[in-house]
Image (cartoon, coloured by chain):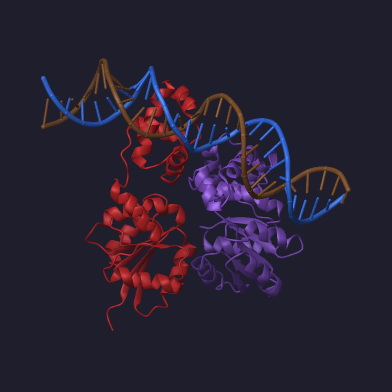
Chain colours: A purple, B red, C brown, D blue
DNA sequence: TCCGACGCTGGTCTTAGGACCAGCGAGGCA
DNA sequence: TGCCTCGCTGGTCCTAAGACCAGCGTCGGA
């Protein structure tokens, strides 16, 4: 029998991590070498535990999955991304960053185990929706590059806040907020804040 | 020692169910009497296993958590709703339907066990955000009755359209659209169209 | 050193948006 | 019949929003 597949589980929900551990721990060829609840923990665990495969949730507080993918880079462990239908827009960027596969979070546990083995064997695993997202993503840049401040302002727009409210929340002038809004609208190709809010919701921001 | 608290776990994600089972199964005063992956299964399990407390995810395919709540009614088990920040808008309606408590999905497992005991003991458990939603919801009906036309206009707002665009799409004057917007904003208690669009998205409209 | 990106701020201006006043006609119900 | 709801429309008015002009200072990289 071969060496077991060393697995790292990265998800910000303890319940999900425990569930995955419970299922995957039953697989004789898997060795769960660690867990992480956010991106920084994940990177530390990758360095320390040296997994073969990382199960990675893209949407986490702080350093998120995309950042983890980018920092792991090409030479590190295979990354199997746990995603959901509302996160499909993140797929192209994640592929670009080196993700080896995508599975939906509601995947059957046996299918998940199979997916882990598939990516560990060096293949790339894409869900049909991910393929569709790739095709779309090939036509346009996957995610416009907002500055940190623009992202922050967008997040608050996506909470329904006015410019004045955002200005108060960030401790800057309303004029400054307007500037960021004007800039971010152009970047995401939205005509107004309503469209921006919708964009943000559909891109998992806010 | 008292009778154990009979628990039913309702969530469409097997991983979540397993994770909850793994945590809660360790509690000596809990007896997990079943699991369900959707609303219909949940209702069948409630009838068959007769739980004291149901852990219920509101957002499920098919018969969702709200429908489950409504069908369980007042005489049935206590329902502790598993929610997330993006689902807070569902809170007033769920309370109206009899939910005994709300916890975020990323809750610490010990806190979750405590929450279960709390609702089992007959108390109502509300997160601070849920209280805020209640206060808003207490002043207004949980699910506003929009006129057909208002719903139509809201759907188009949720697609990012301006009043002028909506007027063209519906073949009415912009003035008429403005009237509908003013009326629907008041009904859903939104300050502006951006909030209305977000409301619509979170209520599965558009 | 120069240049670009970033965040911040001011100014001017136009207009879309929304509140609130009013009214009409049609349909349904007590 | 009277009242309510609905959809439609007009008017007035104020302001939030956004475009586009400008500038400052800081930081990092070539």
Rendered location of residue D4, percent (x, y): 21, 31
Instruction: Count numbered badges in the picture.
Output: 0
Q: Is residue A130 visible to the viewer in this orientation of the structure?
A: no
The answer to which quarter of the image holds residue A125 is bottom right
Name the residue: 32% across, 50% down. Answer: B137
Query: Outermost residue, bottom direction?
Result: B1
In the picture, the quarter occupied by the C terminus of chain B is top left
Rendered location of residue A22, percent (x, y): 52, 72
Q: Is residue A32 above or below residue B185?
A: below
Rendered location of residue A174, percent (x, y): 56, 44
Task: Describe residue A166's horizontal placement relative to residue A4 as left or right.
Answer: left
Q: Is residue B89 visible to the viewer in this orientation of the structure?
A: yes
Rendered location of residue A167, percent (x, y): 54, 48
In the picture, the quarter occupied by the N terminus of chain B is bottom left
Task: Describe residue B81's horizontal placement relative to residue A140 as left or right.
Answer: left
The answer to which quarter of the image holds residue A54 is bottom right
Name the residue: 43% across, 70% down. Answer: B21
Front residue (pair A102, B176):
B176
Task: Describe residue D15's horizontal placement relative to residue B9 as left or right.
Answer: right
Front residue (pair B54, B119):
B119
Front residue (pair A172, A188):
A172
């Amino acid at each position: 029998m071969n060496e077991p597949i060393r697995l790292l589980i990265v998800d910000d929900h303890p319940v999900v991590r425990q569930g995955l551990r419970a299922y995957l721990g039953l697989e004789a060829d898997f060795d769960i070498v660690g867990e992480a609840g956010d991106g920084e923990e994940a990177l530390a665990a990758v360095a320390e535990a040296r997994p073969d495969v990382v199960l990675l949730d893209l949407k986490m507080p702080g350093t998120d999955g995309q950042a983890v993918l980018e920092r792991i880079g090409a030479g590190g462990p295979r990354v199997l991304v746990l995603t959901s239908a509302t996160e499909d827009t993140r797929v192209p960027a994640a592929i670009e960053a080196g993700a080896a596969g995508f599975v939906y979070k509601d995947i059957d546990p046996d299918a998940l185990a199979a997916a882990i083995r598939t990516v560990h064997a060096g293949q790339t695993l894409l869900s049909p929706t991910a393929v569709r997202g790739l095709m779309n993503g090939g036509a346009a840049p996957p995610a416009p590059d907002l500055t940190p401040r623009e992202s922050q302002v967008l997040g608050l727009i996506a909470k329904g806040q006015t410019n004045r409210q955002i200005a108060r929340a960030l401790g800057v002038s309303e004029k400054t907020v307007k500037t960021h809004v004007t800039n971010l609208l152009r970047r995401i190709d939205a005509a107004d804040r309503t469209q921006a809010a919708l964009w943000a919701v559909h891109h998992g921001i806010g």
